Image (cartoon, rainbow, N blue to C red):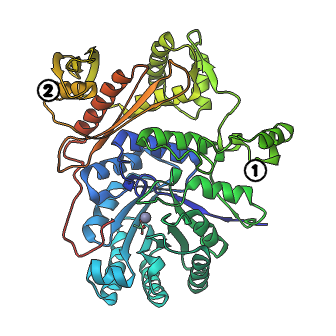
């Protein structure tokens, strides 16, 4: 039987980045886009070009790098937004502009302060203008879940006529039940026919984003917008891994559709996103949570030992999680074994990157007996995130704080090779370290969040520290990661990584706020 292709539209870099605390720097975004391409997603929504110069830069670089997936930028239904989107994606072999405007009565009246006919005119003008830059245009009816069906049909017809090839029906506030989504999509599918592809974009406010997207597919939707680990605004978006695995595991029901996703790249992609954003999926998260394949009760363990499928509906290997092979390398492992392991973990590095990673691996192996898959993932990911290094930590010495004043001596090196040393005190050891770094670099960081976790097991486990720091009150906080067996060293490295990220994006982080009479995302 001929199967319809479900277009997988990944918005981890746009809606996913709207998760509180999930901002990423340009290098991290490029790394994620390459991994999404490897995963096989059809469309990568790389960002919202007009939001800030930083977003624009990241999208342009992704457009230059990604060859197989379509690169897309979001744009409000405004000329300036569309122009920025068109310019940012210009270099991509396959490109799309995704423009939107709100269509629900509540949004039109209170947010846009526009009449329905003005909204239609604005949407049509936006789609027409987008066609000056690209052939592939998506139009979204923001808050479609609460929009009047008659009005939706009107604006959809007008925008298809103007040139939109994909019509997205978002449940922006995550309010719909699966049967309601099914009913709406069926009616719109009958109305639109083959004039455009119907897409859905479901938010997870009631925990129904995946169920709603699956119901949309049963009723004619052929594009699904989703994110890795279900990241996204508020409670997040439909999770790519859940959708793809549901379609695969229940192919008896979804026997008329298929996706292009290489499911073996799901787990590596999930780990990459978690380590870059510092947002771990909840342990019991479907498909990629730490416990997704853990069988705790005696009865279950007994069953699984006798026959895996008693309690396992798909194998961890299907998503690229190798449960048998987690103890990896040690001090005496060679370069070839190291390279082979990285490939198995889903990293495709060039020679220079492998050399740098191998050097770091050897340094680690001197201090840590067993190196696990998670250690390697963290090592390589942190190397990739810290490409633009203005500052580097050379040495850190801490004075005992028991009963005394916590103090730290720090030496750092600038990219031109000059070294600086200073010592300072603080309210606690971490405060002393961060304040001393501030003094040395003449910056003033406000620590917004601090997280430490052990990457693998054992007393010599690597500590992975993630900090979120605001260096300028007008700009969003940036994230930094640090990795070391020593938690304080990891903390200092994380703070410096955040500072480097801030400096590399200086002036580009500031989100544009304008008083345009249009939606903001
Ligand atoms: O949730 C939403 O409506 C969106 C649109 C911009 C597609 O993110
Ligand atoms: Zn959204």
| Residue 270 visible to the viewer | yes
Residue farthest to the front, as pictured: 403
Quadrant where the N terminus sits is bottom right
The percent position of residue 289, horizontal first and vertical second, equals 58, 45
Mark 1 C-beta closer than 8 Å to ligand 2: no
Q: Nearer the viewer, residue 299 or 438?
A: 299
Using residue 146 as the reference point, say whether residue 24 is left or right of it.
left
Residue in the foreground of this view, choosing between 512 and 212 = 212
Q: Classify residue 506 as left or right of residue 91.
A: left
Q: Position of residue 333 (x, y in %)?
A: 59, 12
The quadrant where ligand 1 appears is bottom left
Name which residue lies at 21% across and 25% down: 432
Q: Tell me the number on the disc at residue 313.
A: 1
Question: Can you identify the residue that label 2 sits on?
Answer: 439
Label 2 environment density (alpha carbons within 10 Å; few <14, some 14–19, many ≥20): few
C-alpha gap between disc 2 and disc 1? 55 Å
Q: Quadrant of the C terminus?
A: bottom left
């Amino acid at each position: 039987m001929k199967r319809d292709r479900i277009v997988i539209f990944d918005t981890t870099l746009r809606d996913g980045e709207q998760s509180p605390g999930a901002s990423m720097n340009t290098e991290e975004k490029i790394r994620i886009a390459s991994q999404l391409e490897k995963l096989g997603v059809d469309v990568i929504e790389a960002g919202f070009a007009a939001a800030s110069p930083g977003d624009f830069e990241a999208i342009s670089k992704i457009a230059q790098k990604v060859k197989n997936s379509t690169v897309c930028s979001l744009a409000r239904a405004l000329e300036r937004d569309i122009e920025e989107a068109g310019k940012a994606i210009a270099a991509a072999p396959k490109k799309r502009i995704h423009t939107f405007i709100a269509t629900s009565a509540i949004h039109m009246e209170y947010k846009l302060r526009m009449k329905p006919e003005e909204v239609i005119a604005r949407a049509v003008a936006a789609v027409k203008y987008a066609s000056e830059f690209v052939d592939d245009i998506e139009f979204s009816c923001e808050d479609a879940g609460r929009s009047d069906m008659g009005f939706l049909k009107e604006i959809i017809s007008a925008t298809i006529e103007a040139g939109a090839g994909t019509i997205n029906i978002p449940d922006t506030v995550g309010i719909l039940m699966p049967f309601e989504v099914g009913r709406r999509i069926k009616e719109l599918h009958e109305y639109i026919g083959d004039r455009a592809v119907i897409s859905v974009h479901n938010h997870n406010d009631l925990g129904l984003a995946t169920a709603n997207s699956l119901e949309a597919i049963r009723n004619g939707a052929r594009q699904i917008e989703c994110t890795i680990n279900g990241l996204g605004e508020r409670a997040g978006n439909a999770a790519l891994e859940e959708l793809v695995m549901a379609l695969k595991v229940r192919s008896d029901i979804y026997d008329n559709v298929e996706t292009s996703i290489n499911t073996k790249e799901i787990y590596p992609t999930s780990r990459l996103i978690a380590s870059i954003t510092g947002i771990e999926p909840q342990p019991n998260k479907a498909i990629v949570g730490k416990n997704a394949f853990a069988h705790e009760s005696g009865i279950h363990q007994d069953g699984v030992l006798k026959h895996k499928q008693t309690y396992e509906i798909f194998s961890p290997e299907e998503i690229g999680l190798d449960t048998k092979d987690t103890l990896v390398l040690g001090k005496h492992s060679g370069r070839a074994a190291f390279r082979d392991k990285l490939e198995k973990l889903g990293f495709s590095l060039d020679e220079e990157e492998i050399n740098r990673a191998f050097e770091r691996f050897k340094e680690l192996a001197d201090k840590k007996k067993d190196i696990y898959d998670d250690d390697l993932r963290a090592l390589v990911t942190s190397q990739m995130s810290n490409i633009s290094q203005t500052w580097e930590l050379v040495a850190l010495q801490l004075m005992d704080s028991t009963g005394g004043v916590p103090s730290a001596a720090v030496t750092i090196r600038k990219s031109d090779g000059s070294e600086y040393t200073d010592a300072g005190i603080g309210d606690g050891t971490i405060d002393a370290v961060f304040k001393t770094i501030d003094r040395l670099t003449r910056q003033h960081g406000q620590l917004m969040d601090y997280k430490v976790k052990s990457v693998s097991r054992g007393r010599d486990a690597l500590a992975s520290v993630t900090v979120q720091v605001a260096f300028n009150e007008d700009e969003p906080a940036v994230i930094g990661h640090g990795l070391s067996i020593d938690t304080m060293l990891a903390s200092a490295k994380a703070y410096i990584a955040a500072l480097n990220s801030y400096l590399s994006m200086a002036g580009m982080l500031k989100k544009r706020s304008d008083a345009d009479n249009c939606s903001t995302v």
